Image (cartoon, grey):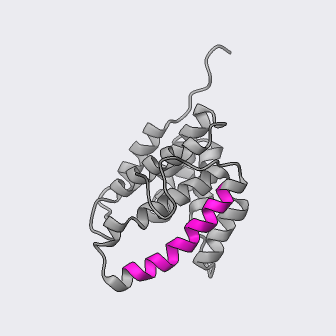
Amino acid sequence: MILPPLRRTAADARTVATVAHDGQVDKGGRPYIEHLARVAAGVLGLSEGCPFWSDLERDEALQAAWLYDVVEDTSYGFGDLAKEGFSDNVLTSVAMLTKPGGRVTYAAWINNIAKVGTLRATLVKLADLEDNSDPGRLALLPPETRERLHLKYEPAKAILRAAAAAKGWLGSPTTVEGSGPR
């Protein structure tokens, strides 16, 4: 075989996410796709701490960053993403990042990602939380909501940073402890 099999790219994932999340807004009233774009940019920055990743691994992390909320927050399911041609690696990351149903607490879910999630999924969730806890975004929310989210996200970010390091992540020069991408 001369050419590799056709595969989906981060640009394809961005297209699917844009269509799937059309009309959705975040807690601040902004188009939801803007959050996903910041998460993808955050993953790209965090991936600097993964010099051992191939271009494919980095691209699959970006795909997961664009798609991680599609199954949870839209009418698209895993079957739809598989039909679109996304790899098992990307689908596995999306599955790890989709909140489980039932009575699983947020802390238990974060701990599960930290324990059994891939480095790819761990960094996507960390980038998501970095964006969700950005002071500029939090400033748009009522003080009691800001405090509740701070108490929720800061311990989760610490758990995910430690888990990422245990999985080989070397850290990233584009992030500073307790802040989002610079």
Q: Is residue 1 above or below residue 98?
A: above
Task: Please provide percent x and percent y for residue 43.
Answer: 50, 49
Is 151 left, or right, of 26 in this rendering? Answer: right
Q: Which secondary structure class fits the magenta region best?
A: helix
Start and end of the magenta stretch? 146-164
Residue 31's spot in the image, x, y percent? 29, 59
Count of numbered circles in the view: 0
Could you say where residue 139 lies in the image, as x and y percent from the top left?
A: 30, 72
Q: In the drawing, does residue 28 fall left or right of residue 122?
A: left
Q: Is residue 39 above or below residue 3?
A: below
Q: Is residue 72 above or below residue 60?
A: below
Q: Residue drawn 52% across and 61% down?
A: 177
Q: Residue at x 61, y 70 (%)?
A: 100
Residue 169 can be seen, yes or no:
yes
Q: Is residue 63 visible?
A: no
Verify whether residue 119 appears in magenta. no
Residue in the image at 67% along x and 54% along y: 165
Residue 17: x percent and y percent? 41, 50
| Relative depth, front residue between 60 and 4 | 60
Closer to us: 101 or 109: 109
Quadrant of the rendering where the N terminus is positioned: top right
Above or below: residue 18 compared with residue 143: above
In the displayed structure, does residue 73 sit left or right of residue 107? left
**Furthest residue to the bottom?**
144
Compared across the picture, whether 151 is left or right of 87 comes to: left
- Quarter holding residue 98: bottom right
Confirm whether the magenta stretch covers residue 156.
Answer: yes
Q: Nearer the viewer, residue 61 or 22?
A: 61
